[in-house]
Image (cartoon, grey):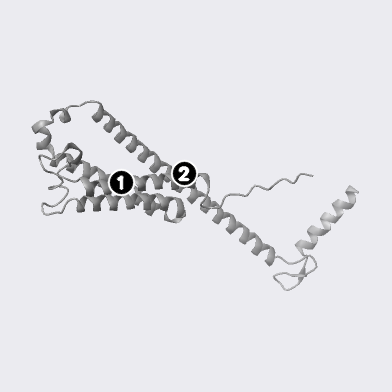
Amino acid sequence: MKIKKRRRRPTRYVTARHRTTYLFALIFLALAVLLLVRLGRDWSTAADAPPRSSCYRAAGLLAVPSAAHPAVDQAYVAVTATWLLAAMLLAVWVGPRRRYFVMAAAALQFPVHLYAVAALRTGNQALLEAGHESENRWDFGQTTAVLLLLVTLIEFVTKVREAVRFEKGLRAEAKARRREGAGTRAATAAAAAAPAAGEPVLAADGHVAENPAAKQATAAETRRESDE
């Protein structure tokens, strides 16, 4: 007789969705480390630097003129990468009670990176106009960037609407449970306050009155005997 092995259910944090998230986090972490290494090894703003060592000028809107490069740039990459990984793992591990904090931590990254890109572009505008006029023309790269930005905004609005509908559903469900619980408690209290079938009932004038429970029990017994 062949015994069928029982398939073990995955634990709470090791489902297929969690494993996919962990794999993405590892790949992102590897790319962040490679970027940090590349910044520390090849950073140069000299005019005669080779093309692979040329970097944007970050002084001005993104960093103070006295900032030490590439230390501040590595700090920016390290902080934002850690921020993204923390928000991602919190969304996987933290329960629904902390959902507002997780959503805020994830959404606040967008204005930070958007400001960094705009500051880099503005700070290097003079260099682009000097010898790279093609950077100012509207072509495939700009169109792709705008489309990706539009997709991100649409996704953000969609998720916010889904979260609002989810919250409304939770409130309605909690309200229904409270109403049901109140009705159950009232019925229990009424049943506990009602006299049993064999107990006498005193009227307002002090005389013994007919017990409603006994009357109902007698009527039910009579109906059962007539049916038989």
Choose top left, top right, bottom left or bottom right for residue 216. bottom right
Looking at the rendered structure, the secondary structure element under dot 1 is helix
Where does residue 17 sit, x and y in percent of width and height?
Answer: 49, 44
Left or right of residue 132: residue 194: right
What is the C-alpha distance between the residues marked 2 and 1?
Answer: 21 Å
Where does residue 172 sit, x and y in percent of width and height?
Answer: 50, 49
Report the disc number at residue 73: none
Could you tell me which residue is drawn at 9 percent across and 37 percent down?
A: 126
Q: Nearer the viewer, residue 201 or 48?
A: 48
Q: Nearer the viewer, residue 102 or 50?
A: 50
Compared to 19, does 130 lie above or below? above
- Disc 1: CA contacts within 10 A as few (<14), some (14-19) or many (>=20): few
Looking at the rendered structure, the secondary structure element under dot 2 is helix
Could you tell me which residue is drawn at 17 percent across and 39 percent down?
A: 121
Q: Inspect this view and state whether residue 164 appears.
A: no
Residue position for label 1? 34
- Disc 2: CA contacts within 10 A as few (<14), some (14-19) or many (>=20): few
Choose top left, top right, bottom left or bottom right for residue 218. bottom right
Residue farthest to the right, as pictured: 228
User: What amino acid type should be assigned to the residue bearing mark 2?
Assistant: Thr
Could you tell me which residue is drawn at 16 percent across and 38 percent down?
A: 50
**Which of the two marks, 2 or 1, is nearer to us in this view?**
1
Report the disc number at residue 20: 2
User: What amino acid type should be assigned to the residue bearing mark 1?
Assistant: Leu
Residue farthest to the bottom, as pictured: 206
Q: Nearer the viewer, residue 47 or 9?
A: 47
